[in-house]
C-alpha cells in the first residue's frame, strides 16, 4: 500500500487517482470524528467535504512535520467546530422546522389562518420589489443551503445537475433545498405580513 | 375540531412534505395523503402557494446581482471545475 506521503506527492503533481485513494482511506474515519462533534449527519458530511477542499487548497502548505492524518484531522476538527457552532447558533434563532412550531395548535393544525400573499395588493409581489429582500436573505443562508437554492432556483439547474456540481446525494440536496426555500418563505412572510 | 383518521396527516407534517412533493419524490401513498390534506385544508394550500411564489420570485432575481456570498460561491465552483 502506498504511504500517505507518496499519495500526497502524486496529488501535488495533479494525480486525481491519488486523491480518490486518500478519500477512500480517510472518508469513514473523518465522518465518524465529525459526527461526534456536530448535531447531525448532514453537517458532519459538510465538514468532511469542506476539509477535502481545504486539503486541496492547502496542499502546498503541508510541510510534513506532522503526519498527514494529524494534519487532516486537525483541519476537520476546526471545520466541524465552526460548522457545529454555526448550526447551533442558527438553531437558536430559527428552528429547523419549515414553520415555527408556535404557529400550530396541539393537534398540529394551523393556529391562525395563513395569509394569502396576493390578495392584499397586486403590485406587492412584483419581482423587482422583493428582489432586494430575497437577495439579502440568500446572503444570510448557511452556505450549503444558499448554494443549492441559487443553483436550483436562480440558475435553474436540475436536481441531478446540482447533485453533480456540489457532490451531494439527492436526499441531502432536498434537505438543503427544503431548509433554504422555507427560510426564504419565512422572511417574505414576515415582510409581507408587516407591510 | 377535525377528527383525525389513522392515515390523515396534520398541517405541521404537511409543511415538511412540500419540497418532496414539488420534487415529485413522495411515495404514491404519501402523495395521496398530502393531496387529500391540501384539498381539505385552505391554510396548507395557501402555504403551498407561498412556497411556489417564493420559488418564482427567487427565480426572477437577476443572477448578475446576486449577493456577494452567492457570487463568491459560484466563482469558486467555476474555478474548481476549470481545475478538474
Image: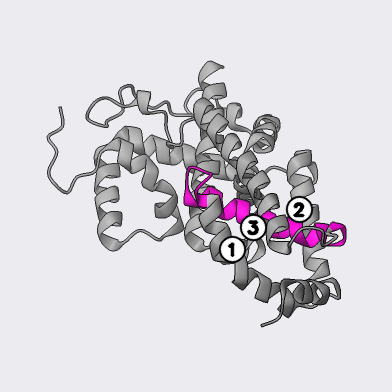
Q: State the residue lying farthest toward the bottom.
A: A1
| Residue at position x 25%, y 38% in the image | B10
Image side of residue A117 versus residue B43, left or right: right
What residue is shown with label 2? B74
| Residue at position x 50%, y 48% in the image | A36
| Residue at position x 66%, y 83% in the image | A1
Q: Is residue A12 above or below residue A62?
A: below
What residue is shown with label 3? A49
What residue is shown with label 1? A163
Q: Is residue A147 above or below residue A105?
A: below
| Residue at position x 59%, y 31% in the image | A125
Q: State the residue lying farthest toward the top.
A: A194
Q: Do the residues under discs 2 and 1 have CB atoms within 8 angstroms?
A: no
Count neighbours of disc 2 (C-alpha within 10 A) and say few if under 14, some if 14 to 19, many if 20 or more: some
Helix, strand or loop under label 1: helix
Tell which subunit mark 3 falls on: A
Amino acid at each position: 500500500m502506498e504511504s500517505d506521503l507518496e499519495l500526497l506527492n502524486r496529488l501535488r503533481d495533479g494525480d486525481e487517482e491519488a486523491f480518490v485513494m486518500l478519500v477512500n482511506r480517510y472518508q469513514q474515519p473523518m465522518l465518524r470524528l465529525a459526527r461526534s462533534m456536530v448535531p447531525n449527519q448532514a453537517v458532519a458530511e459538510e465538514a468532511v467535504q469542506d476539509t477535502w477542499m481545504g486539503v486541496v487548497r492547502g496542499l502546498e502548505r503541508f510541510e510534513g512535520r506532522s503526519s498527514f492524518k494529524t494534519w487532516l484531522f486537525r483541519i476537520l476538527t476546526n471545520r466541524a467546530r465552526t460548522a457545529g457552532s454555526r448550526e447551533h447558533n442558527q438553531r437558536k434563532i430559527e428552528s429547523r422546522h419549515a414553520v415555527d412550531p408556535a404557529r400550530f395548535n396541539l393537534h398540529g393544525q394551523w393556529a391562525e389562518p395563513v395569509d394569502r400573499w396576493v390578495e392584499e395588493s397586486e403590485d406587492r409581489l412584483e419581482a423587482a420589489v422583493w428582489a432586494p429582500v430575497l437577495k439579502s436573505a440568500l446572503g444570510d443562508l448557511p452556505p450549503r443551503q444558499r448554494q443549492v437554492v441559487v443553483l436550483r432556483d436562480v440558475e435553474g439547474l436540475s436536481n441531478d445537475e446540482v447533485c453533480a456540481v456540489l457532490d451531494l446525494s439527492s436526499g441531502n440536496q432536498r434537505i438543503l433545498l427544503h431548509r433554504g426555500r422555507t427560510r426564504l418563505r419565512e422572511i417574505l412572510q414576515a415582510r409581507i405580513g408587516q407591510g | 375540531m377535525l377528527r383525525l383518521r389513522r392515515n390523515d396527516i396534520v398541517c405541521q407534517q404537511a409543511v415538511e412534505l412540500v419540497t418532496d412533493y414539488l420534487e415529485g419524490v413522495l411515495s404514491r401513498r404519501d402523495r395521496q395523503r398530502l393531496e387529500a390534506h391540501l384539498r381539505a385544508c385552505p391554510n396548507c394550500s395557501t402555504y403551498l402557494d407561498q412556497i411556489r411564489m417564493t420559488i418564482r420570485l427567487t427565480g426572477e432575481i437577476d443572477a448578475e446581482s446576486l449577493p456577494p456570498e452567492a457570487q463568491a460561491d459560484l466563482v469558486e465552483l467555476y474555478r474548481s471545475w476549470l481545475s478538474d
